[in-house]
Image (tube, rainbow, N blue to C red):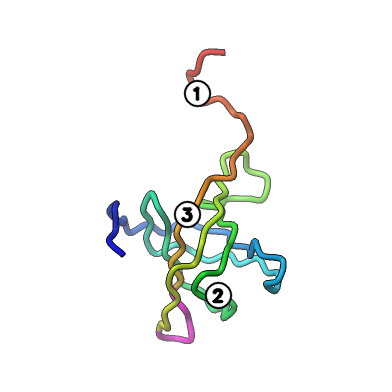
Amino acid sequence: MKRSSRRAKIARPVRVRPSDPNDEHFEDLPVSVNASKEGIFFSTRRKSYYKGMRVFVTFPYSSPHDPMNCEYVAEVVRVEELPNGKSGVAVHFKMSMNFSGAKSPGAAH
């Protein structure tokens, strides 16, 4: 699959949770390795990721109730073995979940 946007090396906290109730529930808080408009790549010690897995991804993540959090429905498109017992996980954003209705700064009211 050809990339449609460039990836930038960016280390930001991420929160990942499975969206499928059949998957074991967890909350992973890895740090991104790189990111593009379409997705992110991160490394983790968690072994429960698999290709095709649906997840909720909050990126960047600061705290559970930060109104600036942006949550996405995403799909794991690649899982690769990394050194030190870690796995590299690539996720592709499917859609944004932000329905807060927050107005952007400077928007007309």
Is tag 1's residue or tag 3's residue first in the polypeptide sequence?
Answer: 3
Label number found at residue 79: none
The residue under label 3 is 93
**18 vs 2, nearest the viewer:** 2
What amino acid is at disc 3?
Answer: Phe
Cα separation, mark 3 vs mark 2, equals 16 Å
Residue drawn at 31 percent across, 55 percent down: 8
What amino acid is at disc 1?
Answer: Pro
Part of the protein shown in magenta: 83-88
CB atoms at circles 1 and 2 under 8 Å apart? no
Q: Residue 29, how many percent across, how many down?
A: 58, 64
Q: Nearer the viewer, mark 1 or mark 3?
A: 3
- Residue 86 is inside the magenta segment: yes
Residue drawn at 36 percent across, 53 percent down: 36
Is tag 1's residue or tag 2's residue first in the polypeptide sequence?
Answer: 2
Q: Is residue 48 left or right of residue 7?
A: right
Residue at disc 2, secondary structure:
loop
Cα separation, mark 1 vs mark 3, equals 25 Å
Q: Residue 79, how many percent across, how many down?
A: 45, 76
The residue under label 2 is 49
What amino acid is at disc 2?
Answer: Tyr
Q: Residue 105, how many percent across, how many down?
A: 50, 23
Residue drawn at 48 percent across, 86 percent down: 85
Looking at the rendering, which quadrant does residue 80 occupy?
bottom left
Q: Is residue 84 left or right of residue 100?
A: left
CB atoms at circles 1 and 3 under 8 Å apart? no
The residue under label 1 is 105
Residue at disc 1, secondary structure:
loop
Residue at disc 3, secondary structure:
strand
Cα separation, mark 1 vs mark 2, equals 37 Å
